[in-house]
Image (tube, grey):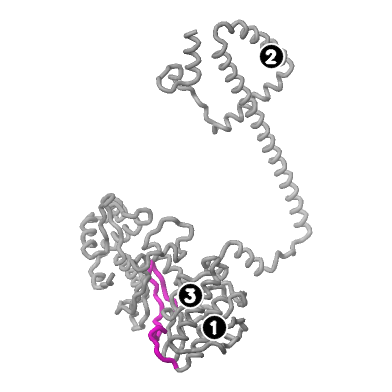
Amino acid sequence: MKLDVDVLRYLTKEDFRVLTAVEMGMRNHEIVPAELIERIAALKHGGTYKVMKNLLKHKLLHHDASKYDGFRLTYLGYDFLAIKTLVNRGVFSAVGRQLGVGKESDIFEVATEDGTVMAMKLHRLGRTSFRAVKSKRDYLKHRSSFNWLYLSRLAALREFSFMKALEEHGFPVPNAVDCNRHCVIMSLVPGYPLVQVKQLENPEIVFNTIIGIVVRLAEHGLIHCDFNEFNIMIDDDEKVTMIDFPQMVSVSHRNAQMYFDRDVECVFKFFSKRFNMSFHECTADIDGTAVDTDDSGRPSFTSIAKDTGFLDKELSASGFTKKDHEEIAKFIEGGIKKDASSDDEDTEDVGDTEDDEHTSVLNEANTMGIDSLQVVDQVLQHDEQVELEGNVRTCEGGPSSEPENEDSRNEEGDDETVDDDNDAELEKRLNKVRRRAVTAARGGRKTFASRNTYKDKGGKSSNSSKIQRQLSSW
């Protein structure tokens, strides 16, 4: 999408207020309803629909009525919001020509009031040429749903943080100035991409410098993952500068060795094709650090000492887990310091014993509750079995078996009265435990029988209604 900043000077405060309202609505809406935009914008004199019509004319909004009548921001509208914010901060005051186009971003020239020229990178994820962002990049992490504008914002924040940290540790990267939404402002690198360079005075020195950068990154806990001739800038003095950082991962990533070997292979392949270099006599010492190499002269990932710094921890690079964070924290602290006095130790021991006693009491209570629930379940299952057996007997016996059932019931009643006299206290306890367990299982709610349970509604009737009909027929 072409960035036409001439429209920016004609937009009013109401236009930017409506654009901001659409942006806020897109936090939880794929397409923001017009009524919600009007409520969020809350223009004093109304006219929200007229403003949205003007924004539609300049292609800052997109109207979608497939599911319902609503609007969403376009990349041009998102660009205008970011540029307006940065201009209000005083970061720059003018936008110039386009410097480059990539599969994930566009780069423009910007200038400050005193004439200093800088670079503005606008991330534009979701282009047709690069839509596999969810599988190729880890911006989403644990999220399942995503929006292209939100992904572009995450990529910009990540690149700005990486650039800032690498600059502080002395890496040859552009100077990070400011960041807003999906826009990153950085210093303009005087030079050309390495892919455009046909000749070099000292290709061996440039090659060793580039391989040294890859090794230094690994020593600081990071891997570039896209280190090739397109992301390396070189000036007339053959000074190397690396760019493009959103895809960097940690050395503890599960595919770290593969990414490291791929970066090294890209550099070796380019220099062998472009400058006809042979790598049989490759230097073993890179930037003063001894690095083991294989038969072809390529640095080995396993031999690199990864204890120079913990940039992957500071920047939460991909592949850096909580376990790694705890191990590094222990390494930095040097173990737990035992400088506490004996009184503090005694109080801690007393506190530990009290906690142990408390936990033991809780555990006993839990076990008692579990045992009581098991007893209640057994009693309930026994009652259900007795009821089912009684129903089956009544169905099989018929009218002739009624006197015998009555005699057996009388005998059982006499036995039960004797048992009740002997074990009255035990039954009371069991009844209490049964009530508590039933209320706990039902979540404290009482179940009430329906008013129409006695009615036969037809269809699939209950077991009790069938038995009643058979008894009435007998």
The residues tagged by marks 2 and 1 sit, at their Cα atoms, a distance apart of: 92 Å
| Boundaries of the magenta span | 174-200
Q: Residue at x 72, y 19 (%)?
A: 423
Mark 3 touching mark 2, by CB under 8 A? no
**Image x and y of residue 335, in percent:** 70, 66
Q: Residues within 10 Å of mark 1 (few under 14, many from 20)?
A: some
Residue 189 forms part of the magenta stretch: yes
Is residue 199 visible to us here?
yes
Q: Which residue is mark 3?
A: 164
Dot 2 falls on a residue whose secondary structure is: helix
Q: Residue at x 56, y 16 (%)?
A: 391
- Badge 2 amino acid: Glu
**Image x and y of residue 108, in percent:** 33, 77
Q: Look at discs 3 and 1 and give the one toward the viewer.
A: 1
Q: Residues within 10 Å of mark 3 (few under 14, many from 20)?
A: some
The residues tagged by marks 3 and 1 sit, at their Cα atoms, a distance apart of: 20 Å
Indicate left or right for 416 with 133 as reference: right
**Image x and y of residue 300, in percent:** 59, 78
Total marks shown come to 3
Is residue 109 visible to us here?
no
**Image x and y of residue 308, in percent:** 60, 77
Which is nearer the N-term, disc 3 or disc 2? 3
- Badge 1 amino acid: Gly
Numbered tag placed on residue 416 in the rendering:
2
In the image, residue 26 sits, relative to residue 165, either above or below, namely above
Which quadrant would residue 83 be assigned to in this image?
A: bottom left
Which is nearer the N-term, disc 3 or disc 1? 3
Q: Which residue is mark 1?
A: 212
Indicate left or right for 256 with 351 as reference: left
